[in-house]
Amino acid sequence: MRESAKAHRRKETALGYFFLGPQLVGLLVFMLGPLVFALVLGFSNWDGFGTMTFAGLKNFATVFTDPQLVTSSRNTVWFAVLSVPGQLLSGFIVAWMLQKVVRGKSFYRTFYFAPVVTSSVAVAVIWLWLLNPDISPLNTTLKKMGLPAPDWLQDARFTIPAFAVVAIWQGIGYQVVMFSAGLENVPKSLLEAADIDGANEWQKMRKITVPLLSPTILFLSITGIIGSFQIFDLVFVLMGTNAPSASRTIVYEIYQKAFVEFNFGVACAIAIVLFLALLALTGLQLAAQKRWVHYTE
């Protein structure tokens, strides 16, 4: 009887591994394999065709000393500083206003979510026209208002802010959906109790709504920072393969080093440093959550 039970368990285990097999193979071939290969390349000199030689820490030293890579890293951080709070704030405001809408709420949510499902290439093509200094309706409006109309994609002072505006416009729909779901879960009884106590809208927002939305804010800030540090498609489509120094980001540099200069060692070193930086930032955010994130039971 006991041998029969053991045989049955072995059969179930084998069947489990059989069904997990394709996923495990995919994980090893397409996830772990490239990760290990990238780690090896980070310590190597290789152009993709010749002999691979050991480079030690030379590629990582290049990441921190190359002036262009330092500038691109600074551009990436500046983009994250502008785009992440911009997406959070605009998404929260729109979601909060939609809570007040009685009719057509689904239409407005679809309207705001449309840019999210639009390809970044199509979005970039649209914004190429909107940011064109000669034919842009945005610049025409600014001129009519007596304000300066900058050359958004050529003036180094405005390039990264222009990218941030496009990213905020494209990402606001996702933020609205997440904040709307969070607002739906705010207990109505707490808001009604605050009304009875004479609290105004700002006090209810600051003391009840925002604290209860803190898990949503934490999630969106983590995913937002990770996404902002990986910006590439907008830069590539808006600026082309020879983007000016002031508009380059760190993932754009990975592409340049790997597929234009064929310096795979430095490209992988940049990717590894980027991964460690995002890991550290995410760890700091999770460590700091104890001070400001409130979870309801």
Image (cartoon, rainbow, N blue to C red):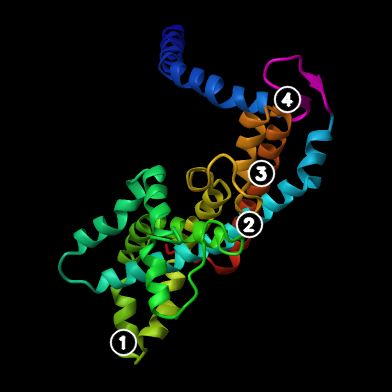
Tell me whether the residue at label 2 lies in contact with that at label 4, contact meaning CB atoms closer than 8 angstroms.
no
CA–CA distance in space, label 1 to label 2: 42 Å
Q: Which residue is mark 1?
A: 195
Say few, some or many: other residues with alpha carbon within 10 Å of mark 1 (under 14 / 14 to 19 / 20 or more). Answer: few
| Residue 261, image x, y percentages | 68, 30
Q: Is residue 44 magenta?
A: yes
> Which circle marks residue 40 in the picture?
4
Evaluate if marks 2 and 3 touch, with contact meaning CB atoms under 8 Å apart: no
In the rendered image, the quadrant that contains the C terminus is bottom left
Q: How many marks?
A: 4
Quick check: 37 above or below 171?
above
In the picture as drawn, the residue positioned furthest to the left comes out as 103
Q: Magenta part of the protein: which range?
A: 40-55
Which residue is at 53% across, 44% downward?
232
Is disc 2 placed on a helix, strand or loop? helix
Question: Where does residue 273 sit, x and y in percent of width and height?
Answer: 70, 42
Residue nearest the viewer, comparing 247 with 100: 247
Q: Disc 3 versus disc 4: distance between alpha carbons? A: 16 Å
Residue position for label 2? 77
Foreground label between 1 and 4: 4
Sooner in the amino-acid sequence: mark 2 or mark 4:
4
Residue marked by disc 3: 274
The answer to which of marks 3 and 4 sits earlier in the sequence is 4
Name the foreground residue: 216 vs 185.
Answer: 216
Mark 3 neighbour density, 10 Å: few (under 14) some (14–19) many (20 or more):
some
Q: Residue furthest bottom?
A: 198
Query: What's under tag 2, amino acid-wise?
Result: Val
Towards the viewer: 297 or 116: 116
Q: Amino acid at mark 4?
A: Val
